[in-house]
Image: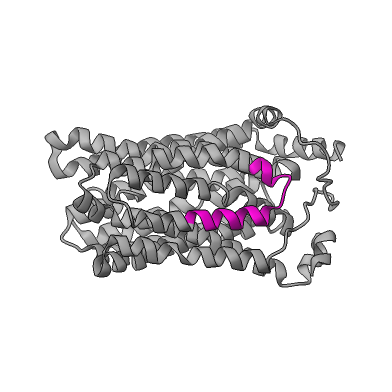
Amino acid sequence: MSKQFTSTHSNYDKSGYKHYVLFMLFLVYMFNFVDRQLLVILQESIKQDLGFSDTQLGMMSGFAFALLYVSFGIPIARMADRGNRRNIVALSLGIWSLMTAICGLSYSFIQMLLARMGVAVGEAGGGPPALSMISDLYSEKNRATAMSIYSSGIYAGLIAGYVFGGWLGDTYGWRTAFIVIGLPGVLLAALLMYTVEEPARYRPNGEIQDTGKKQEPFIETLRMLWNITAFRYIAIAGGLSCFSSYGIGNWMPSYLLRSFEVSTAEVGLWMGLTAGVGGLLGTFGGGVLVDKLKTSDKRWYIWLPAIAMLGTIPVGMVILTTNNENLAIALNGLTVLLFATWLAPIIALSHELVGPERRAQATAVLFFLINIIGMGMGPASVGILSDAMTSAEGVDSLSYAMMAALVFGGGFGGYCFLIAGRSLVCEVSTTRYQISLNQ
């Protein structure tokens, strides 16, 4: 089996092994988001038990988490561009799963915050190395589709986290939920180590990259990425889009629980089904659709995400103003579908704009901006704004804060995607020419 990894892409196509690797990485990404969504669905129970404020909850699921996530993401990505990516992913999975279980043993804000920071450090090593592996397993022709399958792990995790986490929280308590859901990830890490091999790194011409060369300083990678206009704007657009999606998604269960007479288990079930299915369809559909559309015009890498993000605004406004809980939950699935559409095309595009020796680093830089703006500032901003408006708006303060995040992130994110499209075709061609010269 290891001989396949010193061959070419055509050898992968003759075997189902690469699909097994993709499935394993999908499961890893699913566990990543099970752990994240668990806090979201249980935060009202944690608030009542430990007396946390909305600002503290927003910090745990937002800024403090994102700060550690992005700080460790880039150095780990540099290791992944030179070292064994499989080992990095497995170790990271084991760390964040163990720290998730430890969250269930917390009795104060500081204890919970430190445990969540441990989860963030572990999860920092999951995405960039895994996506770099996928780029070597799948050619440019089907890469966005493969990445959409991997990225759909987000919403498979969302379903499991909402439904199973909500049921566990209602039945056995939030502490048990963290422990029961966290520990199986350690077993998956061991399975990954013993059944998946490290793939070779391929250049666009099919040759294997020489990993023995000295790695260039990270500042050179940053300078190169900054000089690619399309990359610069898709990173900003992705951050603004995540500001909106995390600002809405992380607070939607709390909004429903405060606005309607429903239980945590009910919210978990219906949020898991509608948002999970919508996210799976959006993620997979976005990758497959862009792989078809880009053959006529590369700018569909950008146009599809722009259309999706601008479409979230009217749908989200209906959710946050309706008095019908069934309509709100149903439309939330559509909103999540639109939010999910942009991720796979943008990751695939970023890998097309750089060489194989920079793919994990490019992904880490992209994730840095996406997560520091989106995951870091989105939930925290909504929580702070909600607390600030509570005295004037009462229970409606949360919905107004979520509306602000929706309009700001969705509107400016869609606009930045459109700007990125202006220079895309020229920069893809130029980058491929420069890579060929350096081979």
| Residue 58 visible in the displayed image | yes
Q: Nearer the viewer, residue 164 or 125?
A: 125
- The N terminus sits in image quarter: bottom right
Q: Is residue 273 above or below residue 383?
A: below
Res 177 quadrant in image:
bottom left
Report if residue 355 is visible in the image. no
Residue shown at 66%/56% (left/top)? 87
Q: Is residue 238 left or right of residue 407?
A: right
Pinpoint residue 353: horizontal percent, then vertical percent.
70, 40
Residue at (68, 47) in percent of width and height: 80
Q: Main secondary structure of the magenta part?
A: helix
Magenta region, residue range: 77-96
The residue lying at 86 percent from left, 36 percent from top is 437
The answer to if 171 sits in the magenta stretch is no
**Vertical placement of residue 381 versus 114, above or below:** above
Above or below, comparing residue 413 to residue 149 in the picture: above
Would residue 423 be found to the left or right of residue 216 on screen? Answer: left
Residue 278 relative to residue 419: left or right: left
The image quadrant of residue 214 is top right
Q: Residue 6 in the image: state x and y as whole percent.
A: 84, 60
Quarter holding residue 161: bottom left
Q: Quadrant of the C terminus?
A: top right
Query: In x, y percent, where is residue 185?
Result: 50, 63
Q: Is residue 357 left or right of residue 326?
A: right
